[in-house]
Image (spheres, helix red, strand yellow):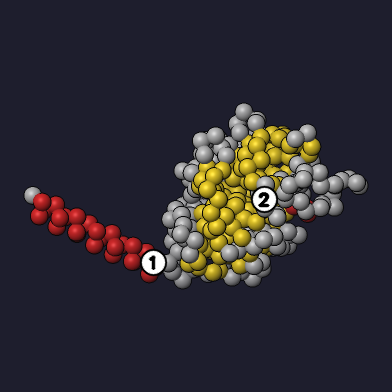
Amino acid sequence: MKKSFTIIFGILLISFLIVSAKKKEIGIIAKNAEIKQVGSGHSFTEGPAVAPDGRVYFTDQPNDRIYVWDEKKGISLWLEGTGRSNGMYFSKMGRLISCADEKNQIAYFDDEKVLHPLHAGYDGKHLNAPNDLWISPNGDIYFSDPYYHRPWWPEGHKEVQETRGVYHLAQDGEITRVIDDFKTPNGLIGTPDGKILYVADIQANETWKYNIEEDGTLSNKTFFAPKGSDGMTIDDEGNVYLTSGKVWVYNPAGELIEEIEFPEMPANICFGGKKRQTLFVTARKGVYTLQMNVKGVN
């Protein structure tokens, strides 16, 4: 009996190693895949967020617009007048949540495309300018709050938060600053099990990872990659995608496994399409796609 078990275990182990080797050999990019420009003529594209149906919504913040990309129909204008939406993310309920920095808010769009504030301050002062966000499986929101002065702000608008931080916004509305030691926090993404959060310090050109505790706080700050990032995403193998001049892909161990160059410098990134196997990249005036072997999970 013991011998039979040992043989079966050995066969399973060999099969696993073969599959793993083949995966590594195949790579994360689909065979013969080419980068395609699917949109152009924008001022600065940002904030791609995949909807439950696989369509990707993205912003052109200087023009205060949100567009939607459909893998069959292409790109169409979704809304003009968006509260200067920047980073965006869909909740589990299918609601589009936005970093709307016209009024320094975390906000959401209702079914009529009307923007409603969720949160707009900390410690009695307005936020600097929410930039990017990720929604955990339990519905809590993590967002970065750096400071980039905007021409649409009224004269005299100033940076009032003493820290360019990262915040945890619980579903009951309680807000907590969970990172306060970055130079300029920007991109962030979490794992689909809600246990790990990756956060980029774009000014320091570093990305760190944290354990997410039950109360939403972060612990065990660990260096992850020697690159900062504007926007970030993650695939079903746990690989993390950073945007810094090009797209840098790191495996869960923090090892660089792929570099992907685009015609323009990437600003943000997500997986789209019904199968979530289309890498969608916002890059300055254009937007691009690339077919992948891996799938997005956020």
**From the viewer's perspective, is 261 left or right of 20?**
right
Q: Decide if residue 146 is in sight here.
A: yes
Disc on the earlier residue, 2 or 1? 1
Q: Residue at x 64, y 70 (%)?
A: 263
Marking on residue 202: none
Q: On screen, 129 above or below 40?
A: above
Q: Residue at x 69, y 60 (%)?
A: 203
Q: Please provide percent x and percent y for residue 24.
A: 38, 66
Type of amino acid at the residue the image marks with label 1: Lys
Which one is nearer the viewer's eye here, 183 or 45? Answer: 183
Instruction: From the image, tell me which residue sits under label 2.
Output: 181
Marking on residue 24: 1
Dot 2, crowdedness within 10 Å: few (<14), some or many (≥20)? few
Q: Please provide percent x and percent y for residue 149.
A: 81, 53
Mark 2–mark 1 Cα distance, whole angstroms, equals 36 Å
Q: Please provide percent x and percent y for residue 41.
A: 73, 62
Give the secondary structure at mark 1. Answer: helix
Q: Residue at x 46, y 43 (%)?
A: 193
Q: Residue at x 67, y 47 (%)?
A: 180
Dot 1, crowdedness within 10 Å: few (<14), some or many (≥20)? few
Q: How many marks?
A: 2
Q: Nearer the viewer, mark 2 or mark 1?
A: 2
Q: On screen, 73 above or below 130?
A: below
Q: Please provide percent x and percent y for residue 247.
A: 58, 65
Give the secondary structure at mark 2. Answer: loop
The residue most toward the top is: 172
The residue most toward the right is: 155
**From the viewer's perspective, is 109 left or right of 31?**
right
Q: Decide if residue 81 is in sight here.
A: no
Type of amino acid at the residue the image marks with label 2: Asp
**From the viewer's perspective, is 130 left or right of 235?**
right
Which one is nearer the viewer's eye here, 281 or 133? Answer: 133
